[in-house]
Image (cartoon, rainbow, N blue to C red):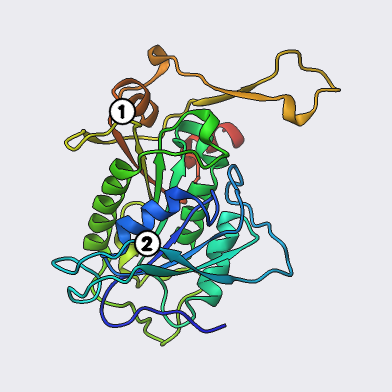
Amino acid sequence: MNTTHGGGDAPLILVTNDDGIASPGLIAAVEAARTLGNVIVAAPTTQQTARGRSLVGEAGDQFHEIELALPPVDGGAGSGAGGAASIGSVRAWHIAASPALVVRHALATLFRDRYPDLVISGINYGENLGNNIMISGTVGAAFQAAAQGVPALAMSLETDIAHHFSYEELDWVAAARVTRSWAERLLAATFAGPYHPPDGRVPRDGSQNHPAAALPFDVLKVDVPAVCPPGTEERLTRLSQRHYFLSFMDDPGPESPLGSAKTQIDVDPTGLDRDDDIYAIAVDRVVSVTPLRLDNSAPLDAARGVLFPA
């Protein structure tokens, strides 16, 4: 397989997702990003929702290249290659693997000479909020990128639960607009030309010398409300400690099959902090922008008092 790397001095952007290579949300993310730099797509072959950051896949599979047909875009200010017109297709690969494994395999095989300058994961069918985000393959793919030193944006659009596992017709215009805006901001904060490691090798597990290492966060999680006209507030939020989606069974017992579990949104505004991501989406109906860290450590002093009492 040929190594993939961006030409010139334009940013190199990897777009991925957890809904699969055929997802309209993935196409919307590509449309949003393709005039910001050189876009490469690597996504799961099939739907991989709720895989979190798991590294599972078919061991014998490899990337399969396809073309994603897109309408041509006129060149101009901000287009990818010095104002040149964008072509009507984007190089893309798919593989039978979980989202995080797709990212890990892409960084090892498609980006051997130069890592991407930004990973965009999404746009997901369904919001990713509160303590449910560890389930999310969208967020899992972004965390895998961040763990290997690449700035990552996890994009999700609020949808009905019925849309989480099917490619229903949705309006992606607003979510694509928000995706482009935050991709531009992240690139403005981190991109100063193609990154070439001091030893000439692309780092496999991140690098403290990479410009992204100076960011105070590892992943930017952005959730877009279903109705989001231009001018909708974009609010910096914290990750809620509460659940957002609740799984339940009507009459649970040992004989209950896994498929009998149902999912519903469970939001009690009185138990939420106004700075939380859930409150932003479910109550105030604004864009939620949540900076996340890979560091899951609890406060050591507090833990020491419990685990090593004087």
**Which residue is at 50% across, 33% downward?**
131
Residue at the limit of the structure toward the bottom, as seen here? 200
Q: Quadrant of residue 249?
A: top right
Q: Please name the amino acid that badge 2 sits on.
A: Leu
Q: Which mark is residue 70?
A: 2
Q: How far across and down, in percent of the image, does residue 74 sit?
A: 20, 66
Q: Is residue 241 above or below residue 189?
A: above
Residue at far left of view:
77
Q: Could you tell me which secondary element the residue under label 1 belongs to?
A: loop
Q: Is residue 280 visible?
A: yes
Q: Is residue 268 left or right of residue 162?
A: left
Q: Residue at x 64, y 57 (%)?
A: 55
Report the residue marked by disc 1: 275
Q: Quadrant of residue 89?
A: bottom left
Left or right: 152 with respect to 47?
left
Q: Amino acid at mark 1?
A: Asp
